[in-house]
Image: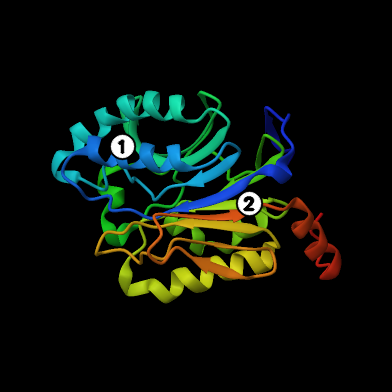
Amino acid sequence: MENIIFNNTNNESEYKLCSLLFDTVTPDYNTNLQTLLSLIEKTSDNSLIVAPEVCLTSYDYDNFEEALEFAHVANEAIKKASHKKIIILTMMERRDGEVFNFAKIFHNGRVVYERAKAKLFRFGDEHKYMSEGSDPIEIVEVDGIKIGILICFELRFKDFWQILEGADVIAIPSWWGVLRTEHFENLTQALAIMNQCYVVASDSLDAECTKMSGIITPHGKVERNGNKPCLEVEYSKKEISVMRRYMDVGIG
């Protein structure tokens, strides 16, 4: 499948990768949005930023309609914050009578890509409130960086790993249960090693979640946020190329 390309004009070597870690279960959605915008504002231009899954509303099924409506407010605010930055997160929205959890890429004032979550987590009752998306998993190129996205539970599906071979960065916006923390750590590292790319994983600081946001390099080196709301790592296209030449497993 050919890559979808958006605004391929920048020198990608200048980018920084940023994984976010913050509390996403405050009762006021605006508080979450302002926390997100504050963290984005602190990043430098040419940052690729990944936030936790549904970080603005959490899975607030008790106030589901309000959560869905908030997406309209959030979209406009994040568009404004996305100039000279790539911002990746998910939010729940209703489309044509169905509710989906959309992964979105914001860049230079626009939503340049979106895809509905294809694999819902039934242990969390997601299937009772939302529909699974039918759009294909694919690589999109934004400002010279080939990006793949796996939304939380989708990380467990090995077929998706193969589809994303050739990506420079795989973003993992997540709401991953604390009881399976080791799974999240091992799978995110293994994905980077297997696909010889950067993995930027972002999980919530909520007590139910792993809190294991982090960035893994194409060599498999792991850095976790720890107590940093925003962990930054320099992006290097050369590091990807070197790893793929050194350990040639057929990834172009």
Please state, as top left, top right, bottom left or bottom right, where the C terminus lies in the image.
bottom right
Task: Answer few, some or many: residues within 10 Å of disc 2's Cα (few below 14, many 20 plus, some between 14 and 19).
Answer: many
Nearest the camera: 84 or 198? 84
Task: Name the side, left or right, on which 229 lies relative to 158.
Answer: left
Tag 1: amino acid: Leu
Check the image and name the residue furthest to the bottom. 182
Task: Name the side, left or right, on which 23 lies relative to 222.
Answer: left
Residue at 64%, 63% in the rendered image: 217
Q: How many marks?
A: 2
Q: Residue 124: image x %, image y %?
A: 27, 58
Residue ID for mark 1: 33
Task: Name the side, left or right, on which 32 lies relative to 221.
Answer: left
Task: Answer few, some or many: residues within 10 Å of disc 1's Cα (few below 14, many 20 plus, some between 14 and 19).
Answer: many
The quadrant in which residue 130 appears is: top left
Please state, as top left, top right, bottom left or bottom right, where the N terminus lies in the image.
top right
Nearest the camera: 226 or 3? 226
Mark 1 lies on a secondary structure that is helix
The quadrant in which residue 179 appears is: bottom left
Up-down: is 9 above or below 52? Answer: above
Residue at 41%, 67% in the rendered image: 226
Mark 2 lies on a secondary structure that is strand
Nearest the camera: 58 or 219? 219
Q: Residue 118: image x %, image y %?
A: 46, 47
**How much space separates mark 1 and mark 2, taking CA atoms?**
25 Å
Q: Residue 9: image x %, image y %?
A: 73, 29
Q: Residue 74: image x %, image y %?
A: 34, 30
Residue ID for mark 2: 169
Up-down: is 63 above or below 207? Answer: above
Up-down: is 159 above or below 5? Answer: below
Nearest the camera: 72 or 214? 214
Task: Name the side, left or right, on which 84 lies relative to 102.
Answer: right
